[in-house]
Image: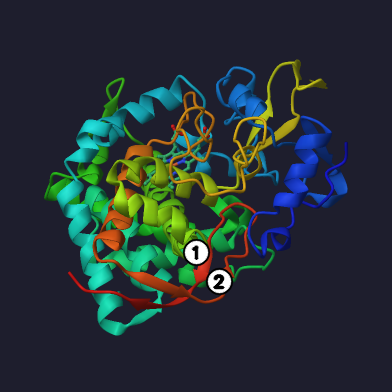
């Protein structure tokens, strides 16, 4: 079937996830087609059911992240290397890169960050309460995740706002608006830059300078680990290092921030469910996962077919593009009972696919994101905070389900 809306158009997501369109697609067929003329490049197949998202995610032999691009639009071959972080690569290279940092993100290791994360969360909520409210994004949802990932990487506190700015500018590359090519002193052709954004140039430049510093003054952080890492006896190249840095900043920041932004809406819309959690703390983990499913912070990732295959009743050929709409599969009514209901005690199995459908690329930061969001939920409930939430302004993007501004007023006690 033809996709009923142009999912390539960021405006389709101007008010959040287009649930009706995704429901119609899931009901009609496993795959829906968007023709070439609507896309920069080749047309693409949209996948909106849970089963096929899982099937694609777990088969990197047939569904590649490396051949082509992981976003919908096509890019030129000479633009691929500058984007090649582990998320854009297939095993075995992907596996070798992931191994360099994976120890820092195991559930056990992540638990050791608890006290530091809680301190950040408390500081942000203290500020919000003292002011009686404000912009939930700039006061709470943005500073917490960037603070946490910057601490892990070794980016000084004074530069956190700059990282937020650059990361936002990367997302702007997925909007319909053209970007200023020379911003941040960029001299590189935009088509060669990740997200086609000059912020990618600035972020690489920043990473390089921090890397140089760590070479002379090593520290106990991920930048030092990456600078000193060797794969098969070789250090990371400049591109490999700067791509790693950009991926960690972007992935650790925009995603968790979006879920935290949506949490404010959920607290107001589904207050009864959070009252249950207040009375029964054992529900924090499932409520946290429900926030993550319901917000589906990353709307999609694409794969490119490498060998002829059959998926959901359709024959696919090498070069075909399949786009996994996590934001569709997370509301698949054959998997999630009453998917549009927010249920604090929703079973965590079968799992939602907000972190991907499993397999090699499953979100490296899943435990960290869960920890951050769970602590925010706990701290809000502990203080008995009640938010009055205004109209959200959504980020213009077909890739990140972000909220740009959200005014809240807040009632309840400080600690
Ligand atoms: C609610 C928060 C988050 C969501 C919804 C999310 C979502 C995702 C998704 C959908 C993928 C791709 C999975 C796939 O292709 O199969 C991914 C990969 C990744 N995520 Fe997350 N993420 C979140 C938080 C984080 C955090 C806090 C970090 C911190 C470092 C992180 C780091 C990564 C990395 C490095 C990858 C690439 C993994 C690979 O290619 O092996 N994410 N994430």
Residue 392's tag is 2
Mark 1 in CB contact with mark 2 (< 8 angstroms):
yes
Marks 1 and 2, the one that precedes in the sequence: 1
Disc 1 beta carbon < 8 A from ligand 1? no
Q: Quadrant of the C terminus?
A: bottom left
Measured Cα–Cα span from mark 1 to mark 2: 9 Å
Location of mark 1 (residue): 265
Instruction: Classify mark 1: helix, strand or loop.
Output: helix
Q: Residue at x 28, y 46 (%)?
A: 281
**Which of the 4 image quarters holds residue 263?**
bottom left
Instruction: Point out the quarter of the image occupied by ligand 1.
Output: top left
Q: Residue at x 44, y 46 (%)?
A: 344
- Image position of 279 (left or right of 65): left
The spot of residue 323 in percent (x, y) is 68, 37
**Which of the 4 image quarters holds residue 388?**
bottom left
Q: Is residue 111 above or below residue 209?
A: above
């Amino acid at each position: 079937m033809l996709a009923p809306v142009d999912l390539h158009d960021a405006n389709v997501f101007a008010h959040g996830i287009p649930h009706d369109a995704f429901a119609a697609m899931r009901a009609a067929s496993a795959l829906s087609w968007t023709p070439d003329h609507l896309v920069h490049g080749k047309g693409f197949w949209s996948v909106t059911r849970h089963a096929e998202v899982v099937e694609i995610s777990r088969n990197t032999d047939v569904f590649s992240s490396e051949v082509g691009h992981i976003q919908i639009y096509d890019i030129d071959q000479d633009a691929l290397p500058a984007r090649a972080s582990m998320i854009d690569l297939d095993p075995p290279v992907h596996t070798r890169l992931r191994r360099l940092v994976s120890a820092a993100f195991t559930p056990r290791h992540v638990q050791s960050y608890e006290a530091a994360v809680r301190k950040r969360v408390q500081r942000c909520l203290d500020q919000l309460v003292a002011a009686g409210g404000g912009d939930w994004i700039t006061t709470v949802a943005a500073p917490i995740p960037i603070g946490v990932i910057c601490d892990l990487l070794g980016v000084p506190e004074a530069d956190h706002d700059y990282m937020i700015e650059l990361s936002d500018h990367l997302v702007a590359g997925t909007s319909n608006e053209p970007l200023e090519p020379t911003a941040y002193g960029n001299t590189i052709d935009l088509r060669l830059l990740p997200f086609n954004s000059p912020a990618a140039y600035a972020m690489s430049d920043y990473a390089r300078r921090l890397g140089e510093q760590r070479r002379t003054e090593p520290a106990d952080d991920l930048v030092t680990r990456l600078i000193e890492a060797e794969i098969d006896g070789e250090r990371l190249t400049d591109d490999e290092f700067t791509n790693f840095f950009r991926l960690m900043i972007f992935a650790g920041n925009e995603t968790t921030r979006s879920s935290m932004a949506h949490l404010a809406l959920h607290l107001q819309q589904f207050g009864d469910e959070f009252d249950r959690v207040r009375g029964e703390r054992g529900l924090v983990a499932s409520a946290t996962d429900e926030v993550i499913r319901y917000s589906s912070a990353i709307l999609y990732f694409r794969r490119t077919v490498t060998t002829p295959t059959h998926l959901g009743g359709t024959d696919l050929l090498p070069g075909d593009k399949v786009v996994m709409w996590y934001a569709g599969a997370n509301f698949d009514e054959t998997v999630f009972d009453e998917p549009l209901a927010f249920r604090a005690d929703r079973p965590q199995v079968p799992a939602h696919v907000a972190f991907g459908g499993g397999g090699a690329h499953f979100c490296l930061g899943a435990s960290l994101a869960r920890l951050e969001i769970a602590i925010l939920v706990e701290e809000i409930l502990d203080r008995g905070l009640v938010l009055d939430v205004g109209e959200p302004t959504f980020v213009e993007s077909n890739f990140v389900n972000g909220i740009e501004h959200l005014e809240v007023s807040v009632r309840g006690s400080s600690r």
